[in-house]
Image: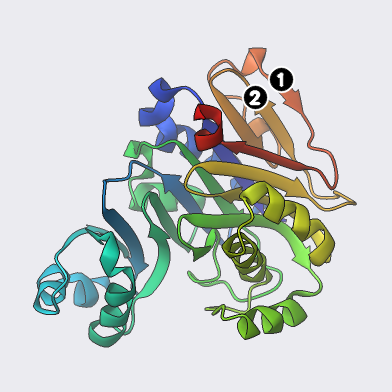
């Protein structure tokens, strides 16, 4: 069944509240998926810096002394530990090098996200526990997406939780099931994409990453997904500056959106939106089947 939420802020005065608002939205969707939960927050980006969010099944062992060990390998980095996750901030020119180094010195860690602004936190458990464990309520940012999962296609694991991130500052949450993900995974592997799980949602995320690598923006990539992905799906997607929503042509999975001068919001059900500021004056609608909805901070500022 799954529950998904998303919030794209237009009003900068709301940015300090992003984590708190998104947390409440996701917790409201708990009964749609008790297996695992996750949130992606797009925060501030420092000039010349990149972030890598990693997860470890043995965080005490893997995170202790990590900054010092990276320095020994020639990578100066700040490491912030949050429970089973850690955010590593480093020189953006070292992206490839840091991944290779981590594979050597900390082989059990797995990347949750990478980029200039995105941080992804996800674990097995209820949304309220994930929110509390990673102190999401105190995180600010420009936009974010969240997911609470009821597993149907693959195992209940941290790596199988949403959001899935397969490209820099890109991530996706999904309610539904894809029928052609195995064939599409093989095609994407031939194009150079790699996969951590057998989850169909990871294939959808990788598809969008591959299409955007060809020069498409998020809206164009989502339009292509309507032709290339088979099955039932509602996607909410984030990029460094963008936020997109698309439903398959049948659109049997529930979805509702709201827009005001301050934000654009998405929820699997309207109750996820009821506590947002000014919701009583929002334009509220059900997104149409096979229709791409796309907002972008950079294009709005252009």
> Residue 160, image x and y in percent?
55, 70
Closer to us: 124 or 88: 88
Q: Which residue is mark 1?
A: 283
Rendered image quadrant of residue 65: bottom left
Question: Does the image show residue 74?
Answer: yes
The answer to whether residue 125 is left or right of residue 293 is left
Residue 259 marker: 2
> Which coloring applies here?
rainbow
Q: How many marks?
A: 2
The answer to whether residue 25 is left or right of residue 44 is right
Mark 1 and mark 2 in contact (Cβ < 8 Å)? yes
Q: Is residue 169 above or below residue 281?
A: below
Q: Residue at x 90, y 51 (%)?
A: 250
> Residue 80, image x and y in percent?
22, 57
Asked which secondary structure carries label 2, the reply is strand
Q: Residue furthest top?
A: 281
Q: Residue furthest right?
A: 250
Q: Residue at x 32, y 37 (%)?
A: 138
Q: Residues within 10 Å of mark 2 (few under 14, many from 20)?
A: many
Asked which secondary structure carries label 1, the reply is strand
> Residue 120, image x and y in percent?
43, 56
Q: Quadrant of the N terminus?
A: bottom right
Closer to us: 253 or 99: 99
């Amino acid at each position: 069944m799954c529950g998904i939420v998303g919030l794209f802020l237009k009003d900068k005065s709301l940015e300090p509240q992003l984590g708190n608002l998104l947390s409440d939205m996701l917790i409201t969707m708990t009964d749609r998926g008790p297996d695992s939960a996750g949130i992606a927050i797009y925060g501030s980006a420092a000039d010349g810096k990149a972030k890598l969010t990693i997860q470890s099944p043995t965080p005490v062992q893997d995170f202790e002394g990590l900054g010092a060990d990276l320095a020994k390998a020639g990578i100066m980095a700040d490491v912030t530990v949050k429970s089973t996750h850690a955010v590593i901030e480093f020189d953006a020119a070292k992206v490839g090098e840091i991944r290779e180094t981590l594979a050597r010195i900390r082989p059990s860690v797995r990347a949750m996200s990478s980029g200039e602004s995105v941080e992804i936190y996800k674990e097995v458990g209820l949304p309220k526990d994930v929110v509390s464990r990673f102190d999401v309520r105190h995180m600010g940012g420009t936009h974010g997406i969240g997911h609470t999962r009821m597993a149907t296609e693959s195992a209940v694991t941290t790596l199988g939780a949403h959001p899935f991130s397969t490209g820099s500052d890109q991530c996706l949450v999904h309610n539904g099931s894809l029928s052609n993900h195995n064939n599409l995974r093989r095609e994407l592997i031939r194009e150079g994409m790699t996969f951590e799980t057998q989850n169909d949602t990871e294939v959808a995320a990788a598809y969008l990453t591959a299409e955007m690598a060809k020069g498409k923006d998020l809206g164009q990539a989502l339009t292509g997904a309507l032709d290339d992905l088979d099955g039932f799906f509602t996607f909410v997607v984030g990029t460094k500056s963008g936020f997109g929503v698309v439903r398959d042509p049948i659109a049997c999975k529930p979805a509702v959106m709201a827009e005001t001068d301050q934000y654009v919001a998405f929820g699997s059900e309207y109750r996820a939106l009821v506590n947002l500021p000014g919701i009583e004056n929002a334009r509220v609608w059900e997104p149409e089947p096979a229709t791409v909805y796309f907002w972008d901070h950079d294009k709005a500022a252009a």
